[in-house]
Image (spheres, grey):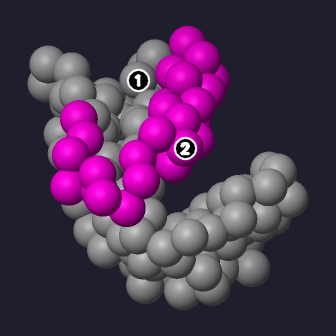
Amino acid sequence: MRIKLLSICFLMLLLTGKCFSQENLSVYELPKPANWHTEKFALPPSFATTLPFSGTEDIRFSPEWSKKHTDGYWTYCFLWRIKDAVSFTKANMEQYLHDYYTGLIKVNLKEAKMDTALAIPVKV
């Protein structure tokens, strides 16, 4: 269930990059299912400064996002609204996602006062 939802969200991310030109950047819709939580912040985020673009990240979190042993655990969808002209080859996208999740994991481990060396390397 979670992999299917993440795959759909990732596809939305890729299609959005193709569908919106710079003239249309202010118009988009990322629906919020009932009881889901939202968050928005600037790109690149502080935990992934190597991302070579700027814009906005718009996230939708499942109500069970932080509840272990539920179908909704770690289920979320995000949209990157990118202002810059950026290459989105398979290799580039793998690197962007690797850098993003590596940074996200490390910042969360630090906040939990855990050794960042415990992190399993991100595979994309």
Q: Is residue 26 left or right of residue 118?
A: left
* Circle 2 or circle 1, nearest the eye: 2
Q: Is residue 95 above or below residue 61?
A: below
The answer to which of 21 and 77 lies nearer the viewer is 21
Q: Position of residue 73 (x, y in %)?
A: 44, 31
Residue for point 42% across, 53% down: 21
The answer to which of 57 and 107 lies nearer the viewer is 57
Q: Which residues are magenta?
A: 1-29
Please tell me the numbered disc located at residue 18.
2
Q: Position of residue 12 (x, y in %)?
A: 49, 32
Of callouts 2 and 1, the N-terminal one: 2
Q: Quadrant of the N terminus?
A: top right
Residue for point 70% across, 65% down: 87
Q: Residues within 10 Å of mark 2 (few under 14, many from 20)?
A: few
Q: Which residue is mark 1?
A: 72
Q: Position of residue 63 (x, y in %)?
A: 24, 29
Please tell me the numbered disc located at residue 96.
none
Amino acid beneath label 2: Lys
What secondary structure is marked by label 2? helix
Q: Position of residue 72 (x, y in %)?
A: 41, 23
